[in-house]
Amino acid sequence: MLRTLPLHKRHIPASRIALGCMGLGGDWDHQPITAEHIKQGHEAVDAALSIGINMFDHADIYTRGKAEKVFGQIFKDRPELRENIIIQSKCGIRLMEPGDTSNVFDFSGAHILNSVDGILSRLGIEYIDILLLHRPDPLMDPEEVAAALHKLKAAGKVRHFGVSNMSAGQIKLLQAYCDEPFIVNQLHLSLAQISWVDAGISVNREPWKDITFPEGTLEHCRTENIQIQAWGPLAQGLFSGRSLENQPENIVNTAAMVQRIARERGTTPESIVLSWLMTHPAAIQPVIGTVNPLRIAACADADKLELTRKEWYDLYVSSRGQKLP
Ligand SMILES: NC(=O)c1ccc[n+]([C@@H]2O[C@H](COP(=O)([O-])OP(=O)(O)OC[C@H]3O[C@@H](n4cnc5c(N)ncnc54)[C@H](OP(=O)(O)O)[C@@H]3O)[C@@H](O)[C@H]2O)c1
């Protein structure tokens, strides 16, 4: 049974898979974008559209703004595209510049408002469909965040809001101050990053490994109709052809299992890896990060497949590297 995305329940007709655009625009530097970057962008968008993807995920920081600039040129070349796709972007991380010691997170009202103006200007569009707050800023003032989001909504610059890398508690805190619902939480989830499943089965037991997934987050998103998106869903190709040199045994074994199930099902390893996420009843929406048209095409079967309970558990236990209690 294919799951209905929470976004659909909110009348946002998003595809089951989104294309992440972090790979567009070349290196994370201040060099201008090139004709080659734009060609790569067109080819990635075409490959995505051809398998039914209509949602594109950006962030103000990706390749230091160049990913959005590439997309801005795509919109210039194909203005009809804008109304047929869903654009999501993110703000709240400030990249390190010379003289800084680190990136920092910044949910100040001024930073959020400036970021969105930058996003719209680089994309060359009047509104984005969804704005995510990228990573929780420990210094955030929820009232100040709420005021900034209210301004963006009132100005017609952003239609919907969401968060990324946030726990249930952090979402609840922000939501207590914001009138607009947070409709997305984008998290690191994949067949290699399985802490979100481990967390659920470790209740009342000795802790299993280092469970990094915040307790109750999946459940909160599901009960509040918040779309869970998975970043890193292809595990950077670990199970679909990337070199396994120096990888631990559980990853090597799981890659072999993915290949076997793909052969048995007559599909690609990429589609099996994604369907492992999509078979879960939380209706997870993978945000694939490849910009290679062949790899995008290899994801095509994921939203038609449903793994059996045995296949799903076999893959989970293999990646976990230890039997369940
Ligand atoms: N919210 C957040 O904090 C956050 C953090 C990171 C990413 N994101 C979003 O999530 C999207 C996906 O994340 P991701 O890129 O980390 O995840 P991913 O989809 O797991 O991995 C994609 C990356 O792996 C490479 N890859 C895939 N298969 C490969 C193979 N067989 N061999 C070699 N390389 C392979 C791709 O290169 P090719 O392009 O060459 O195929 C690409 O660089 C991003 O684009 C971004 O939109 C969000």
Image (spheres, rainbow, N blue to C red):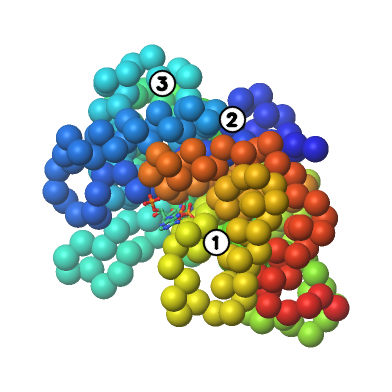
**Looking at the picture, which amino acid does disc 3 mark?**
Arg
> Mark 1 near mark 2, Cβ–Cβ under 8 Å?
no
The residue at 78%/77% (across/down) is 323
Q: Earlier in the sequence, mark 3 or mark 1?
A: 3
Position of the N terminus by quadrant = top right
Q: Which mark is residue 239?
A: 1
Q: Residue extending furthest bottom? A: 206
Disc number placed over residue 14 in the picture, else none: 2
| 3D distance between C-alphas at marks 2 and 3 | 14 Å
- Position above or below: 248 against 179: below
* Residue 266, quarter of picture: top right
Residue nearest the observer in this picture, 186 or 275: 275
Mark 3 Cα within 10 Å, few/some/many (few <14, many 20+)?
A: some
Count residues near mark 1 (Cα–Cα under 10 Å), then give few for <14, some for 14-19, many for 20+: many
Residue 269 appears in the figure: yes
Q: Give the residue type that dot 2 points to.
A: Ala
Residue found at x 47% / y 28%: 49
Give the residue pinned by disc 3: 82
Left or right of residue 264, residue 56 in this image: left
Task: Label 2: state its secondary structure.
Answer: loop
Closer to the observer: label 1 or label 2?
1
| Marked residue nearer the N-terminal end (2 or 3) | 2
Counting from the top left corner in percent of width and height, residue 88 is at 47, 37
Residue ranking furthest to the left = 31
**Closest to the observer: 227 or 257?**
257
